[in-house]
Image (spheres, rainbow, N blue to C red):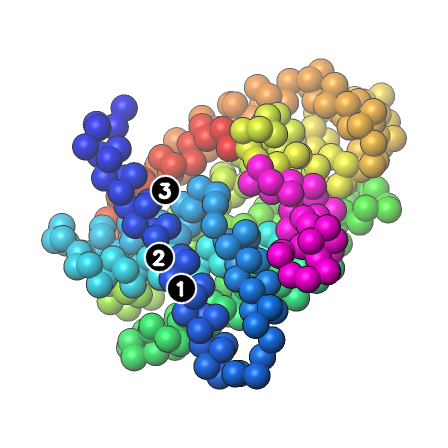
């Protein structure tokens, strides 16, 4: 158990991180007002509300990991207030990227809740005339685009003079591209109106997870912290990537488990993977174990948009002992991850990776 001093330090660091967000949002809006003085002020109010609703909240582990990585690479010295602020600003560009993905993903998956509140497209509109009782609806698509655009406003305003500015831009663009490739594979592997379990496999699942989750959730924050710290050795980035892609897979498998078994009030959303016909870890592992009779149940019930068929799939998972399959995997995978860190960290401090691993091991949300 962490000491009171360490818990307090962690709490203070998280609050310092949170405190950076709203001023950054206001900077983006002030920039828009300055550049486009004739632009509608009520629309800018909508933009502000959308940013605050979608970007604040959640665990914020991705964003916080930029500063954590930078600290590990700073040789034990105290980082300056300015360095901490810059690392946290970079952290918020990742959190905004996450918000851009989530707003879009919730529409594509027809999700209901996110982080314990209605998905943005399901929420009644911001306090703009005529929208008080109207859902945001498909306006959310453009709101997602604006959140993404705000990232580059922050990078330009605060990092344009840095030697690594172009590297930051290229990293952000490449990781966004990788994530969108992963999202496409996820969607076309599991069309909602045509269930074909023969398309599901562990190899397909691993590819989806690698591109959709691991690059932006794990590699991006560590790579940003490394750039801030002046790391230029490509081998070190390659080694970090290998470790963090493995960690990202571990994280997503946990997420798939929690989608099925986690309590909505704990995980902050209603799990929809079964009804959405997702190529998730539980179903691909179940496919390795089913009898012909059980396979028929899966084929008849998986991907159906009703709670009765979803319950049949969950009952089948119970028969197959999928909770134990996951628990065994979690222990084995964590041990394998620890060995990978020892083998591949090289000159990078192992604490960068161990801190990340501790945050996600046996998580419940």
Label 2 neighbour load within 10 Å: few <14, some 14-19, many 20+: some
Circle 1 packing at 10 Å, graded few (<14), some (14-19), many (20+), is some
Q: Earlier in the sequence, mark 2 or mark 3?
A: 2
Q: Are marks 2 and 1 in contact (CB under 8 Å)?
A: yes
- Which dot marks residue 96? none
Query: Given the current orientation, which residue lies at the most extreme top position?
Result: 319
What is the spatial separation of the Cα atoms under label 2 and label 3, in whole angstroms? 22 Å
- At which x and y percent is residue 354? 31, 40
**What range is drawn magenta here?**
108-137
Q: Position of residue 310 (x, y in %)?
A: 78, 28
| Residue occupied by mark 3 | 356
Q: Nearer the viewer, residue 146 or 52?
A: 52
SS at mark 1 in the image: helix
Task: Report, in whole angstroms, how far the alpha carbon at label 2 lies from the one at label 1.
Answer: 6 Å
Q: Is residue 362 magenta?
A: no
Query: Residue at the location (66% across, 34% down)?
Result: 270
86 relative to 356, above or below: below
Q: Which mark is residue 20?
A: 2
Per the image, label 2 sits on a secondary structure element best described as helix
């Amino acid at each position: 158990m962490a000491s009171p001093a360490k818990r307090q330090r962690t709490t203070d660091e998280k609050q310092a991180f949170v405190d950076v967000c709203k001023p950054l949002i206001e900077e983006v809006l002030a920039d828009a007002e300055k550049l486009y003085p004739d632009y509608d002020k009520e629309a800018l109010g909508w933009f502000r509300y959308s940013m605050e609703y979608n970007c604040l909240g959640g665990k914020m582990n991705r964003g916080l990991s930029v500063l954590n990585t930078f600290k590990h690479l700073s040789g034990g010295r105290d980082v300056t207030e300015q360095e901490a602020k810059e690392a946290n600003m970079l952290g918020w560009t990742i959190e905004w990227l996450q918000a851009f993905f989530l707003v879009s993903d919730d529409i594509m998956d027809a999700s209901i809740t996110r982080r314990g509140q209605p998905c943005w497209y399901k929420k009644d509109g911001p306090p703009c005339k005529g929208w008080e009782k109207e859902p945001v609806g498909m306006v959310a698509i453009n709101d997602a685009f604006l959140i993404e655009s705000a990232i580059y406003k922050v990078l330009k305003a605060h990092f344009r003079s840095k030697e690594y500015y172009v590297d930051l831009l290229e990293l952000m663009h490449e990781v966004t591209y990788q994530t969108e490739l992963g999202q496409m594979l996820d969607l076309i592997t599991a069309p909602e109106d045509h269930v074909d379990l023969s398309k599901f496999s562990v190899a397909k699942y691993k590819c989806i997870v690698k591109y959709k989750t691991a690059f932006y959730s794990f590699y991006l924050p560590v790579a940003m912290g490394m750039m801030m710290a002046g790391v230029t050795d490509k081998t070190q980035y390659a080694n970090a990537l290998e470790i963090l892609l493995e960690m990202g897979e571990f994280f997503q498998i946990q997420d798939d488990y929690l989608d099925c078994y986690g309590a909505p009030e704990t995980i902050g959303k209603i799990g929809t993977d079964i009804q959405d016909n997702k190529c998730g870890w539980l179903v691909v592992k179940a496919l390795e174990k089913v009898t012909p009779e059980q396979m028929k149940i899966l084929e008849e019930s998986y991907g159906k948009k009703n709670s009765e068929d979803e319950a049949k799939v969950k009952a089948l998972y119970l028969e197959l002992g999928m909770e134990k399959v996951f628990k065994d995997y979690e222990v084995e995978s964590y041990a394998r991850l620890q060995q990978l860190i020892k083998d591949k960290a090289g000159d990078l401090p192992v604490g960068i990776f161990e801190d990340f691993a501790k945050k996600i091991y046996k998580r419940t949300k």
